[in-house]
Image: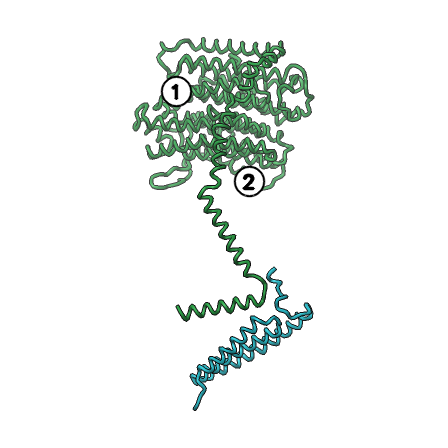
Chain colours: A green, B cyan
Amino acid sequence: MLELLWLVPAIPFASALVLAVVRLPRKVVAWLAVASIAASTIISLLITYSFLHAPPAGNAYTEVLWRWLDVSGFHPDIALYLDPLSLIFMVVVAFVSFLIHLYSTEFMIGDDGYSRFFAYMNLFVASMLTLVLANNLLLLYLGWEGVGLCSYLLIGFWYRDPVNGLAGRKAFIVTRVGDTSFAIGLFLLFQQLGTLNIQDLMRVAPQSWHVGSGVAVAVAFLLLGGAVGKSAQLPLQTWLPDAMAGPTPVSALIHAATMVTAGVYLIARTHVLYALAPSAQFAVAVIGAATLLLAGFSALTQHDLKRVLAYSTISQVGYMFLALGVGAWPAAVFHFMTHAFFKALLFLGAGIVIQALHEEHDIFRMGGLWNRLPVAFWTFLIAGCSLAGLPLITAGAFSKDWILWGAASAAQGSTGLWVAALVGVLLTSLYTFRMIFLVFFGQEHTPIAKKPGAAMLIPCIVLAFLSIAGGYIRIPFAHFLEEVLPWTTRVASAVPLSETASATAAGLVFLLGLVLAWFFILRRPSLSSALVKNPAGAALHRFWFSDWAMDWLYERLFVRPILWIAQIGKGDVIDGSYDGLALLTQGGWRALRSTQSGKLRWYAAVIAGGTIIFIAVVLFL
Amino acid sequence: MNAVPMSHGLILGGILFAIGLAGLLMRRNLLLILVSIEVMLNGAGVAFVAAGSRWAQPDGQIMFLFILAAAAAEVSVALALLVRYYRMRGTLDADTARGLGE
């Protein structure tokens, strides 16, 4: 069964090609796009089954398809590698993609670019599966760039509005900064160790480098740069909120459930390198903690439903980074999985709401929807509770408690990080319930125009089920990942509190956030508006609303200087030579044109003169 | 045999050619330009005959007959064109025919 592995990325890729090239009627497009992902999902589930029941030797399976390049000792293969880590990513990616494709068949039905949309989406799924299944970093990089390309294409999907194109370009350029760092990291790795095969690297690196060696730290930081760009972490997070310009299923699939967690996968995949570079690993934790707090504050102030969710995504990926940074590896992967379920569901619910209200994005103009869109409301509520971490029931609570526990008890954990994560829980709970109360409770501001159909509701219900049930598999999950990503612990005496205490604290903080949100939004809305109107509050609100003025800063720090340099560089010597060439050609054209006077006798004279010159040349030279 | 020296023949040919060329360049009437071309052809013909007589070969005179035939053919076509041109434009001034220059 395992040898079918290559079909998992190949089927969506083939379907993307067909959709891109052949013009098909809508029904066929929908069937083809969904069926290809469904086939991928079924195959990956079968592979999971056989992997669990008859684990291959070494608990990993490599499938070499063909040799990609062979240049002086550098010979990466097109080869897939399946181990518990890539298996989890593969199944989650394929399954969530399938549900979102199903949802999109109805969501996008009125759009002119129906076939184009599904071609991009299928290509995205193929790239993402290549990314997680790659056995060498070069193939991983191919998938990495592939998902980046699809993200760009899909953010700017409604390209007729220039704003969307701008958002797409911004996402592409900002992530490119990280990708460049990633590429340099790959060069350095190859130059030092002579291979890019991930398993070889992980075996060789600890033998060649000692803990904390300069090269290991450099490589770890460079790869971290790539991860930070792709996963929208500080300081490259500014592209994700703008990426919400794309259609909502795209936000659900690419900018919440799958692509933005590619950085998490990369770090988890190369965790051996981070074990060799404690300072880089500490940086991962600090970036994660800082991002989860900053994005949490920003999410509190947003008006646009999708932007709230975008900041929430940044914040939740920050949790995963925090878990990676402290060495709670399985907790990061677990949170990736639960986050994929509940965040995809939140976006799908947001899509239903937005479509029902005539493309209304402003949460302050929504309200009272809970009995108008009951299924959307209940699934959204479940996902929101999972996101905020409703204790004991929801998957999000299990994964977040695990991360909190990791922040306190894992090898690199510390009390400070634990407190940051706990504050993050408060923020998450606050902004989640602020959003839910504003959208579904209170007064109805806009009547609903469209009720969602079955294709949109079924994925929501399935994801809602998973947003709860996903949490209960934590222990088998940890056991499954044990060999690949062992949980690290620090000396028991250094841990300030017990796991139960940590989870209890998180639960209490969750309740506090819920009550505060209820008080400020539903009970005393005047209080929150007074808070925003007060000058200090207004300034803070503006500051958070603009994502800590990051865009403002980058505009002045990078965009304008580059534009300025381009402006003054316009008339330099190199350009002068090209301009000179153009002028020379133009002069020649003028001179030759004047000879074409149309006068018969002039032509005769020129012929005679030319003949004389030729004869003279022959005679006298 | 007291033959004419070749240089005389060539000089005569050269003079005829030069006169023809001068006429070609200076005349504006298309008919006279045609006449000038005939003069130039004759200049070339004289040069051929002179060269043929110098080496006692018949080729020079054969060449002249060819030139004569070509000239006759050319004149017949050219005169027909001139008639057409005159009917179209009402003039034979070569400088009015500048359609290619614009």
Residue A376: quadrant of the picture: top right
Along the line of sight, which residue is nearer the eye, A523 or A81? A523
Q: What is the three-letter code of the residue carrying label 2?
A: Val
Q: Quick check: can you spot residue A70? A: yes
The image quadrant where one finds the C terminus of chain A is bottom left
Residue A621 is tagged as none
Mark 1 or 2: the one toward you:
1
Task: Provide the residue designation for mark 2.
Answer: A18
Position of A374 relative to A500 (above/below)? below
Q: Residue furthest bottom?
A: B1
User: Circle 2 — which element?
Assistant: helix
Position of B29 relative to A443 (above/below)? below
Residue A511: quadrant of the picture: top right
> Dot 1, how many residues are within 10 Å of its Cα: few (below 14), some (14-19), or many (20+)?
some
**Which chain letter matches label 2?**
A
Give coordinates of residue A95: x percent, y percent.
52, 27
Earlier along the polypeptide chain: callout 1 or callout 2? 2
User: Circle 1 — which element?
Assistant: helix
Give coordinates of residue A395: x percent, y percent.
51, 17
Q: What is the three-letter code of the residue carrying label 1?
A: Phe
Q: Quick check: can you spot residue A329? A: no
> Dot 2, how many residues are within 10 Å of its Cα: few (below 14), some (14-19), or many (20+)?
some
**Which chain letter matches label 1?**
A
Task: Provide the residue designation for mark 1.
Answer: A282
Give coordinates of residue A352: x percent, y percent.
62, 24
Drawn side of residue A147 relative to residue A305, left or right: left
Along the line of sight, which residue is nearer the eye, A263 or A164? A164
The image quadrant where one finds the N terminus of chain A is top left
Position of B74 relative to A597 (above/below)? below
Cα separation between marks 1 and 2 = 46 Å
